[in-house]
Image (cartoon, rainbow, N blue to C red):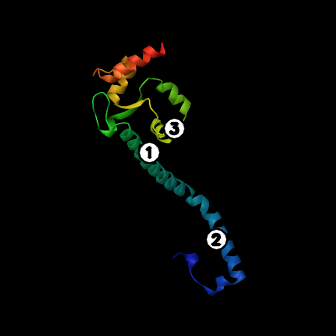
Amino acid sequence: MGAFDMKLPWRETEAGKQWLRAYKNRWKKENRKKNLEKARAYGRKRYHDRDKAIYRTIRETVLNHYGGQCACCGESVYEFLAMDHIFGGGNKHRKARKKDTLAMWLYENGYPEGFQVLCHNCNMAKGFYGRCPHGSTISKLFKSAMAIDK
């Protein structure tokens, strides 16, 4: 129970209510600057932690929806996995999305086709060399997509 919640007879009178209202307003003004940075830091940390947990849950959901493991090498450790545009165009798509992460975009748009899970190694190899050293189906899919675009 806070100091303002106590049942006191003088609080029931109109004069008591006005005094209490004035006291609360004066207290808020005097202490606002003193406690503002502390409150902001608390709020930032609380919302950052909450948003981080939400994003992690959405990312796990998206990765699991698309198979939960690398389509090339079979890696399944969550921290090593990334979403990949099967037919390329990730840079253009990222610029069009502005702030959203790819996982958030996929989640909000109902898991569209044209994406797959790759580990970061396979994804980088595909981006740099056009194929993965493992030589699995992603290389064939990527080559067939490039042939269609030409």
Q: Earlier in the sequence, mark 3 or mark 1?
A: 1
Residue 76 is left or right of residue 114, and the answer is left
> Can you see residue 125?
no
State the residue at coordinates (40%, 17%).
144
- Most foreground residue, 9 or 19: 9
Gap in angstroms between the C-alphas marked 2 and 3 = 42 Å
Q: Which residue is mark 3?
A: 100
Q: Earlier in the sequence, mark 2 or mark 3?
A: 2
Q: Which mark is residue 24?
A: 2
Q: Amino acid at mark 1?
A: Tyr
Image quarter for residue 137?
top left
Where is residue 145 drawn, in percent x and y?
43, 19
Q: Secondary structure at mark 2?
A: helix
Where is residue 31 drawn, in percent x and y?
60, 63
Q: Earlier in the sequence, mark 2 or mark 1?
A: 2
> Can you see residue 2?
yes
38 vs 136: above or below: below
